[in-house]
């Protein structure tokens, strides 16, 4: 029995939305359908804070770096919405996050006929004709067959081991912040602990203290202070396509050294505007004799206990070993997201690929082997149908896969043209 589709997409966030755009504009003649577990298009819905921006150039959108003439660019979205001149008149270095979320929803709406929302994928496996095709099992039990699959479920929140077994609604990841605002209203003067030194941690410290002026925000970080993001244009070249080639062709020890050098272009650091805003607010509060935001430096959370009255954090100063405790009403984990890890790590591959994971080749480090075109490679002389990872390949492709939009449109073209080539080979045709 032939497959139902050429391509099945799992997830319809920015990565696979950009892929749908690429399929259309590259005119590859491929039939594709996407399954998205959310009830509709959304992007960072829990962190659309007032005044927050996207931290990258507006032109690095779903299409423009691949096709500047595309109608799916951010600037054309503004034009079609009648907002272009007003936006240009703002003089903002980066667009508001809310504006970009609306843009993503607008593009997704153009492909509504290719997406089934509210549909969760349970498993992706090889199936049919000797395992050359892909079988996707939905949570309803329905099975969809395709010649290729593109898996883009988004990266999973990183929950520190200390919090891994804490199942309490007062403790949650930063990505859920706006969905958990009701947790702050239980007490008139809540104590809110924010764990981490990320951009999100700084943004949340500002947002909580502005929404609830009577709250006490305690930001716990392992280092001496918040670090400014590396915004050098030289470091910014990690988001060039040429760097992806360089990184991919490097040895694994070389990749880890590059990760060390370039970490602060994206991780454990924040933009100058929010750092300055927080520092100024803390200084102004001291002039008024109050402390709405307290920074607890050089400190690790070593244990967590919960009671009806509070979440108790046991803290240890990392240099002097001094122990202390903090009772919080809310704990927000601004601790980032997982990339793919080695075979013993928390996310060797997304869970829905569990049935094919055993047939995937391993690098010497234990990571899954992914080809330059983002296709999973088979191990041990075996075979796999064409299964691609969209937005999950930082360990093999570098920081351009670190959740940034910068290379998203270029990556979508790489995946789309590779799929066309792979399927043409199986059919004995010429690739478009």
Image (cartoon, rainbow, N blue to C red):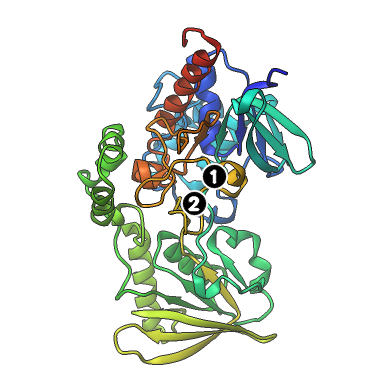
Contact (CB < 8 A) between labels 1 and 2? yes
Return the residue nearer the eye: 202 or 37: 37
Mark 1 packing: few (<14 Cα in 10 Å), some, or many (20+)?
many
Note whether residue 191 is visible: yes
Q: Would residue 382 appear left or right of 252 to someone viewing this image?
A: right
Q: Is residue 170 above or below residue 325?
A: above
Q: Is residue 391 above or below residue 306?
A: above
Note whether residue 110 is visible: no
Q: Is residue 298 above or below residue 49?
A: below
Q: Position of residue 136 (x, y in %)?
A: 68, 35
**Which badge, 1 or 2, is on the more N-terminal residue?**
2
Return the residue nearer the eye: 215 or 337: 337
Return the residue nearer the eye: 113 or 373: 373
Q: How many marks?
A: 2
Determine which residue is flagged by label 2. 348
Quadrant of res 39: top right
Mark 2 packing: few (<14 Cα in 10 Å), some, or many (20+)?
some
Circle 1 SS class: helix
Determine which residue is flagged by label 1. 357
| Distance between the alpha carbons at the discs numbered 1 and 2 | 8 Å
Front label number (1 vs 2): 1
- The residue shown at (45%, 33%) is 381
Circle 2 SS class: loop
Q: Position of residue 264 (x, y in %)?
A: 29, 57
- For the N terminus, give its image quadrant: top right
Q: Is residue 191 above or below residue 254?
A: below
Quadrant of res 129: top right
Q: Would residue 132 appear left or right of 420 to someone viewing this image?
A: right
The numbered mark at residue 11 is: none
Q: Position of residue 249 (x, y in %)?
A: 27, 37
Q: Residue furthest front?
A: 381
């Amino acid at each position: 029995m032939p497959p139902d589709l050429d391509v099945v997409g799992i997830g319809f966030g920015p990565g696979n939305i950009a892929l749908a755009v690429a399929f259309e504009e590259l005119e590859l003649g491929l039939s594709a359908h996407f399954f998205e577990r959310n009830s509709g298009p959304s992007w960072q819905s829990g962190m659309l804070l007032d005044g927050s921006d996207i931290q990258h150039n507006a032109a690095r959108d779903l299409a423009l770096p691949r096709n500047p003439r595309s109608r799916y660019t951010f600037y054309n979205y503004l034009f079609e919405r009648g907002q272009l001149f007003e936006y240009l008149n703002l003089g903002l270095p980066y667009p508001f996050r809310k504006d970009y979320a609306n843009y993503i929803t607008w593009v997704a709406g153009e492909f509504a006929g290719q997406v089934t929302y509210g549909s969760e994928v349970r498993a992706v496996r090889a199936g049919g004709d000797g395992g050359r095709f892909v079988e996707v099992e939905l949570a309803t039990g329905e099975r969809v067959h395709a010649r290729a699959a593109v898996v883009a479920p988004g990266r999973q929140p990183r929950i520190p081991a200390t919090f891994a077994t804490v199942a309490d609604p007062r403790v949650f990841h930063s990505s859920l912040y706006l969905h958990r605002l009701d947790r702050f209203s239980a007490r008139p003067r809540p104590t809110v602990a924010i764990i981490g030194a990320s951009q999100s941690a700084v943004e949340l410290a500002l947002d909580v203290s502005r929404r609830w002026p009577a709250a006490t925000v305690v930001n716990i970080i392992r280092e001496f202070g918040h670090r400014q993001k590396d915004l050098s244009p030289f470091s910014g070249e990690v988001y060039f396509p040429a760097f992806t080639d360089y990184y991919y062709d490097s040895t694994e020890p070389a990749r880890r050294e590059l990760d060390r050098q370039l970490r602060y272009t994206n991780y454990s650091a924040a933009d100058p505007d929010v750092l300055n805003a927080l520092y100024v607010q803390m200084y102004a509060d001291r002039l008024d004799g109050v402390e709405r935001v307290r920074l607890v430096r050089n400190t690790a959370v070593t244990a967590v206990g919960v009671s009806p009255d509070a979440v108790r954090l046991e803290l240890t100063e990392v240099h002097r070993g001094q122990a202390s405790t903090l009772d919080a009403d809310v704990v927000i984990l601004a601790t980032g997201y997982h990339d793919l890890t080695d075979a013993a790590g928390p996310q060797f591959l997304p869970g829905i690929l569990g049935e094919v994971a055993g047939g995937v080749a391993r690098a010497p480090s234990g990571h899954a082997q992914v080809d330059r075109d983002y296709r999973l490679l088979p191990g041990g002389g075996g075979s796999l149908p064409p299964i691609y990872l969209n937005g999950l390949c930082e360990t093999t492709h570098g920081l351009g896969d670190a959740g940034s939009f910068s290379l998203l449109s270029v990556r979508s073209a790489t995946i789309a043209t590779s799929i066309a080539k792979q399927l043409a080979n199986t059919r004995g045709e010429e690739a478009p």
